[in-house]
Image (spheres, coloured by chain):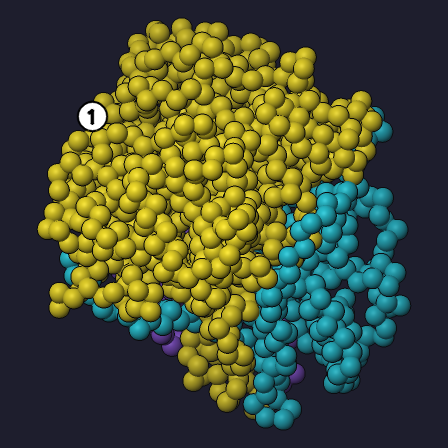
Chain colours: A yellow, B purple, C cyan
Amino acid sequence: MMQIDRREFLKTSAMAAAAAMILPALDGAEGATPADDGIRWDKAPCRFCGTGCGVLLGVKDGRIVAMQADKQASVNKGLCCVKGYHVGLILYGQDRLTTPMKRVDGKLVPISWEEAIAIIRDRIAAAPDRFAMYGSGQWTIPEGYAANKFVKGGLGHNHIDPNARLCMASAAAGFNATYGVDEPAGCYDDLDHCTVLISWGNNPAEMHPVLFSRAMDRRLKGDKLLFIDLTTRRTRSSEQADHVAFFKPNSDLAVANGIAHLLVKKGFLDKPWVEKHFRLRQRVAEYAPDPAKRDVYDPDATHLKNLAGKDISREEYARNLDFYTPEKVEEISGVPADLIRLIADKMADPAERVLSWWCMGPNQHTRGTAMNSLLHSIHHLSGQWGKPGASAFSLTGQPSACGTAREVGTFVHLLPGHLPVLNPHYREVTEEMWHLPKGRISDKLGFHTVKMWDEFCKEGGAIDTIWVQVTNPGQTLPHQNKLFLAKKDRPGKFLIVSDVYPTATTALADLVLPSAMYVEKNGMYGNAERKQQQWFKMVDPPGQARPDAWQVLAVAKALFDAGFPGMKDKDGEWIFARTFKQADGGIPPIWDFAHYYDINVDKALFEEYRPFTKLKHKDLAPYDVYVQAHGLRWPVIEKEPGKWEETLWRFVEGKDPYVKPGSGLQFYHSNTKDDKAFIWWHPYEAAPEEPDADYPFWLCTGRVLEHWHSGSMTMRVPPLRRSMPHAYIELHPDDAAALGVKSGDKVTVESRRGSLTLPAWIKGRGQPPKGSCFVPFFDERLQINLVTKDYHDPFSKQPDFKKCAVRLRKA
Amino acid sequence: MSISSLVIDVDNGVSGRELLAALATDPRFTLGPADGTRHALVVDTPSSAADTEVYDWLQSHPGIRLVTLVRAYLDDEALPVGTAATYL
Amino acid sequence: MALSSKVLTLGASAVAGIALVGLLVGFGQPAPGWRPQSSPDAVVAPAGVLPAVVYREMSGKGRGPNRDYISDLATATGPLPQPGEDKPVDPQLRAEAVARRAARRAYSGAPPVIPHPVDANDVTSCYQCHGEGKVIGTLIAPRISHQRYTNCTQCHAPVAVGAPGSVEGFEVANTFVGQASAGRGSRAYAGAPPTIPHSTHMRENCMSCHGQLSQPGLRTPHPWRVNCTQCHAPSAGLDQSRFEDPSPPPWAGEGVVK
């Protein structure tokens, strides 16, 4: 063999290797590319949390056989968490629901789809106003849109709410209160740029592990990143923190005020950006002084009347904060005064980029709207906002909490495009877009989640029938005895559940519909950073399982055929007729499942939805653009024909196409119509139920890394279930010793609502401070929501799953 | 001497075109075949540190959508001459 | 010529990561209540407690309580093959190794589960054994095959070491059948170097599974050669480097009339 220069040789072989990645012909020999074993790979977002990781699923012989993290996905860049790596297994639990069933003499018996659709049709036609729909942030965008139009456009009322009410509602209310428009201004790229990261009541190492490593892995590369963990219990996230402080439940408001207090003392009220871009605000209405009254639903206290608050002067703002000296805050919260000073110093330092992130802690909070608003506010006041890495970011818990629940507006108070239903202009716009007669859309708010289930379960309640899709309220609603299990004693009530596995919810269902899940259907999700991702159906659903969107459309068509007036548009045609009308004027009979895939139903629904997204500058691109892209963050703007560009930072000049040049920052949806966002003041108040002599412990609930939501999917994935086989109660070692409890011993946890007995885990994965305990909610055999309370935030109506008073004893 | 082979996915806008022009004139780079916006690229630098530097520069370039490192030969030692045969 | 300095890596972050992190030489066993601190002035260890070690400072620390666990390469792995002695792999050993691997993965390419108990919180202690690979008695702790991350248990779930105690009543079977081991690479002709039959994403360090601290049936017969992909070609398809846009479904292009 010829001796060639070694450098040339290396370069030639290097080029051959690079070229081989591009051009198969250059591989040289037949078979040089290994056989791919007949696996066809296709993209989808992960099915679980709100992070929105890109996953590639490998299909062979009609079944998922392998998964990879998508290297081209900007969210996760080729890394998943253990749930994402096993996401394909959720399709294959042996007890998939495969046929419609109705309850006869207490037992579920198989029926046909025709009969099931007819039952729903008749229930609705008999009393449309007493029917409600309960969905989730796991609905795909087209599914949520179809359901929303079905209820608000077809039934003429607004009784449709998602479980995102239990999850995101306070975050949304906080954004609306502060910016006049929902959803984060920043994005995950902030994690790549921040120099200080503050976690508020959050355990991202387990709940958003991919994002957590995205930030923490920077330290391995030599980046400076100070991580401060403000938490109510020690977690895996705390282990990586530079500073950990445990605050007393509910006192996070005091901590935020303590930081604001110091910023004011440092003269930040005089900073030019405060005058130029922000208004100082506080709430209009006082909350009920009696905490016990806070869970009373009061339609007059709707966030739309009071959410934007009222102006206060600089003097008033400063005076309100006078009380919150670092020492006072330490006394209230337990967070050391020096740490509050350190945070304020970091925020005041223009050389730092400070990022706050949070998820359920500030959301599942009776003062959730206030706490979310305060988090934005301390960033506004300090100027730690609007620069890459300097931001306040609200994480989400479900794959499409933003994309479907918030943007499609499947809440009782919203229309598609996050348009408030109480605004007559937006009702008119929606009626026009849907080609409905004027006045079809109701001007009354529907029943939000807690109210909806209360009306369903209580004696003489106003709701008789609820149709549940893609969620498991029989496990995830608070105060199960009151809001779910009471249904057992109400013979006239009728529960319809579309799901993929038997759950605590199907256990009380009168009609069970088998659904197609995840990549058994087409879909689109929108994640926490405003990013829409699309996927195609990859495998067939088992048995007679069918997509949720088909189920809704089939019922809508059955109602139309039966002459139900609401299902007619203003020309007397079916309300979805225009959605699916083809170029030749024909409407494919997609309500007949044999023809469901004659057209791409998802694309038709999405394209009808798209114009709504422009009304609040949340512009989405055409469906086909998402087919090609690995996700795009809105607003997505067509810069030149065919070239669609996403937006990473909203309201910032040069980043957001809607911001006027020369303005620096422009809050173009400002509540006060002057392009200004708010800096809020809210007081710290005690929680509605705090530990006392009878119930001396705090109870906090939450998730663990391996399981997602109610565990109906992840508990059926062997590697995940083996790793975390059951729920447990975490105790402080001193409390455990006082109770005489060792790890593995059974403990009974009891509140004024109910009780539960489960094994203790001392010095386990997390450790609560003395006087508090933690129980994860994923285990259907050990339902902690028998114990929790339905206290909720007065604006967002989101219940507080993070704190109530309990007592403990060795079982 | 460090030689790495990369596949770069280049933005089809102005910054991408500028990047390709810059790569074509820089002796450290050899551009190979392309498939659409994806180009094979060999980087020849004196040291592994320089190679990492080039990689980071590419990663942060506005004209770059994705850089995939196919392989790298990183060697900061002086090369013995005429040893190529060992590798063939 | 040390392997680690020459072995190519796929995924450039691995290049930067290994270069910057340097070699791990072990660290102190953390005391209960241990919490890492990054600012030197922030922590004062109580008397008798080992000072906390931050992961990124580990390379500068000496060995801790595990200092006696030293890799015994000679006895654990047998004599190293010598250059020129390029023996084929024993098919029996290979089959056993593949079966062992499969038992710890839901499918080929899944992150393996952790087959031993771990500290539920100390997520960086993994590197003590898996950073460079280690032999302890008859056990082999393979070296990590990919760049370093801070949160090992994010992807690797421990087996049956979750919460203590037992709760009956949830043993639903799962009918998922994962893709089996990729098998052997293809050869262009007899004697040609086989191609790499699996994705190299997250398996950038070939020596993790094919080096001397790996299962015998998978070890390379020629460990003195340092540039694996010089001869063994990876696959663009498997490595997502030639990503094909999803092929359009039958209805693609059918317009929606508005």
> Splitting the image into 4 quarters, where does residue A695 fall?
top right
Residue C73, position as x, y percentages in the image: 84, 65
The reply to whether residue A280 is in sight is no
Secondary element type, mark 1: loop
Q: Amino acid at mark 1?
A: Lys
Q: Identify the residue shown where x is 26% and y is 42%.
A: A155
Rendered location of residue A453, percent (x, y): 44, 33
Question: With respect to residue A661, does C232 lie above or below?
Answer: below
Chain letter of mark 1 equals A
Q: Kindly give the residue lying farthest to the front in the view shown.
A: A105
Which one is in front, C140 or A250? Answer: A250
Q: Is residue A409 left or right of residue A571?
A: right
Residue ID at (38%, 58%): A115
Residue holding disc 1: A673
How many discs appear?
A: 1
What crowding class fits label 1: few (fewer than 14 Cα within 10 Å), some (14-19), or many (20 or more)?
few
Residue occupying image coordinates x 82% and y 43%: C64
Residue A452 is drawn in which quadrant?
top left
For the N terminus of chain A, the image quarter is bottom right
**Along the horizontal axis of the image, is C127 left or right of A186?**
right
In the rendered view, tell whether residue A527 sits above or below residue B14.
above
How far from the left and from the top, in percent, is residue A757? 71, 34
Of residues C1 and A768, which is closer to you in this image? A768
Q: Is residue A454 left or right of residue A552?
A: right
Q: Nearer the viewer, residue C169 or A303?
A: C169
Q: A266 above or below C201?
A: above
Q: Is residue A375 left or right of residue A95?
A: left
